[in-house]
Image: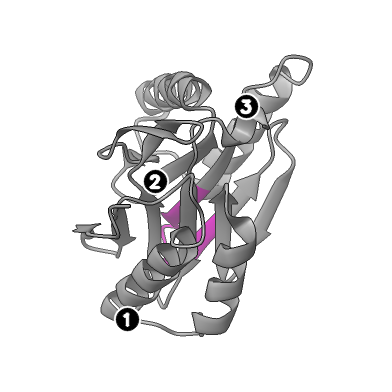
Amino acid sequence: MSIFTYNGSAIVAMAGKDCVAIGSDLRFGVQLQTITTDTPKVFKIHDKLYLGLSGLATDAMTLYQKLLFRHNLYRLREERDIKPTTFGHLVSSVLYERRFGPYFSAPVIAGLEDDGTPYLCGMDTIGAMETAKDFMISGTSPESLYGMCESMWREGMGPEELFETVSQCLLSGVDRDALAGWGGVVHVITKDKVITRTLKGRMD
């Protein structure tokens, strides 16, 4: 079994009209044994920027704490929050520093730029970036998540429709994956607020 599938995870980020959503499942397990069902894989950097980390849970937590530390230093020096594009390059360089002994975690970044433009970015364990205008996924069930997102995403979705779409994609995708699931959490980021909702999924 791959080290990336040791704990199991599913992350979906999707862009709408002046809003962006990112969600993850809540399962934390060791291979096929479920340990807890309240472990989200999406973390807040600031109000307009969220980070999803799939892969090995220990490396994901280490990476999140390291990136939060780097953002706090940036905010002290610059006296402003980091832009999503800048944060994407920061994550990439932090991962590339460790390329010979990498963190076993694949980040997904979702945020809103100052002008309200959605920003989605994903990368591999050594920081090779890829941006997207529609959606970005990561985790142990990429095939079913890709299939759902490709069939359900459309341009110009508002916050409520975007939430519904991300939720359906996430829940349908993890239904076909034994290593992820047990409910989910979705954050919808708009210009003036962040809406966070917890989803109830199949508990088997």
Magenta segment boundaries in residue numbering:
109-120
Are the residues tagged 2 and 3 within 8 Å (C-beta)? Answer: no
Q: Which residue is mark 1?
A: 161
Q: Is residue 115 magenta?
A: yes
* Of callouts 1 and 2, the N-terminal one: 2
Q: Is residue 50 left or right of residue 183?
A: right
Between 60 and 39, the one nearer to me in the picture: 39
Tell me, for residue 50, which label it has, or none: 2
Estimate the x, y position of residue 142 in percent, counting from the top left: 61, 57
* Of callouts 1 and 3, the N-terminal one: 3
Count residues near mark 3 (Cα–Cα under 10 Å), then give few for <14, some for 14-19, many for 20+.
many
Residue 117 shows in this picture: no
Viewer-nearest of discs 2 and 3: 3
Q: Which residue is mark 3?
A: 104
Q: Is residue 105 left or right of residue 129?
A: left
Classify residue 199 by image quadrant. bottom left
Picture residue at 22% right of the left edge, 63% below the top = 192
